[in-house]
Amino acid sequence: SLEAAEIYLTSDIDADTNFAAENIYFLDGVVSVQPGSTLSIEAGTIIRGLPASETSDGNLSALFVLPGARIVAKGTGES
């Protein structure tokens, strides 16, 4: 099987975006889903926040879904 791609997120999400289960996503600082955009997260997707000591700007990692933005995440008991 293919090895998971590690994707580092450093900027806001300002277009419809899909997080695929075969990748691992790392929040590098604060990432916001902007109004009018939808973040879809496949079942089994791994999203991790980097600690402040490892982010590129020294800030904590967080994912914000702003008013007017959408998040769609459907998981199961197994994934």
Image: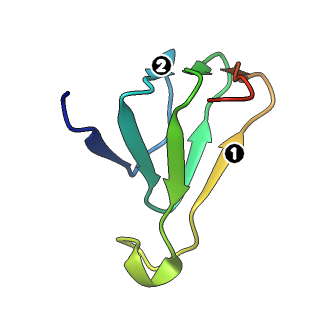
Residue 71 image position (x, y, % from top left)? 70, 24
- Classify mark 2: helix, strand or loop: strand
Residue 66 image position (x, y, % from top left)? 74, 36
Residue 67 image position (x, y, % from top left)? 81, 30
Residue drawn at x 51%, y 75% is: 51
Q: Quadrant of residue 42?
A: top right
Which image quarter is the C terminus in? top right
Residue 64 has which mark? 1
Vertical placement of 38 versus 65: above or below?
above
Which image quarter is the N terminus in? top left
For this orientation, the residue located farthest to the bottom is 53
Give the residue type that dot 2 points to: Asn
Residue position marked by numbered label 2 in the rendering: 18
Residue drawn at x 65%, y 16% is: 36
Q: Which of 72 and 59 is in front in this view?
A: 72
Q: Which of 21 and 67 is in front in this view?
A: 21
What is the CA distance from the residue labelled 1 to the residue labelled 2? 16 Å
Q: How many residues crowd around disc 1 within 10 Å: few (fewer than 14), some, or many (20 or more)? A: some
